[in-house]
Image (cartoon, grey):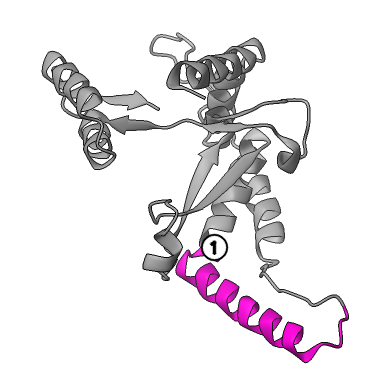
Amino acid sequence: MNATEIYDLYQKGVDHHQRLNMYRECEKFHNFYSGNQWEGLKSGDEELPMINIIKPIGKYKIAMIAQNQMSIVYNSLNSNDPKLAEICKKLSRFAMAQWEKSKMDMLSWRVIKNAYITGDHYLYGFDERTPSQDSVVQDLRPRIKMRLVNKTNIYFADEQNPNIDEQEYIIISERIPVKKVIEIAKKKQYPQRTDRFDNLRRRNRNPNWGIQR
């Protein structure tokens, strides 16, 4: 699949979100939670009434759920094989170490909070090691990274299917500075694309301007 095909799929997801008015709705939800429900209303110098009952109720509900801490535990499914049991113990210890290293308890609060506000929120986990045929052999230390993803920044092949495992593809978008894009292009050894981004940055007055990938 080339870049043009990926972009077409991304644009298809954007069109779906726009038809549902998802971008504006999520912004409105965050404004209401923050007590800014009059955002966009032209009232002159008149001070509008505001009693934010959404946030305290939300904080209570979020805490009730987030306080139930989770963990990853591997189980040999009632097998009596001591080797499988030992492997599961080691995997569970490894999962616990990665959980603490990634600060998952803190991230879970943020996921639950944003899901309460907008309806959905996602946590994307990945190994930061460069994927290659020999990467695991050369570097045995996993570098697990976690990234919070808003519902407006994720696009599924089938938006009607709630089962993520059955999705043909999932596109996650983000806005990053051109400088970072250039670094990625150089690291991936894309000289032509790097030249394009150099020209693009020179034409833009703001060095922190970001593009969506």
Place residue 213 in its image quadrant.
top left
Q: Is residue 92 magenta?
A: yes
**Residue 89 figure quarter:** bottom right
The reply to whether residue 82 is visible in this rendering is: yes
User: Where is residue 168 shown, x and y percent of the image?
Assistant: 68, 32
Q: Quadrant of residue 182?
A: top left
Residue identifier under label 1: 104
SS majority, magenta? helix
Compared to 74, does 9 lie above or below? Answer: above
For badge 1, the amino acid type reads: Met
- Decide if residue 82 is on the left or right side of residue 122: right
Residue at (52, 36) in percent of width and height = 34
Residue at screen point 47% across, 22% down:
2
Residue 3, image x, y percentages: 44, 21
* Residue 53 in sight here: no
Percent of width and height locating residue 154: 57, 31
How many other residues sit within 10 Å of disc 1, few (<14), some (14-19) or many (≥20)?
some
Closest to the observer: 77 or 104? 77
Q: Which residues are magenta?
A: 78-105
Up-down: is 162 above or below 112?
above
Tag 1's secondary structure? helix
The residue at the point 41 percent across, 59 percent down is 135
Residue 81's place in the image compared with 155, above or below, is below
- Residue 210 in the image: above or below residue 186: above
Residue 195 in the magenta stretch? The answer is no
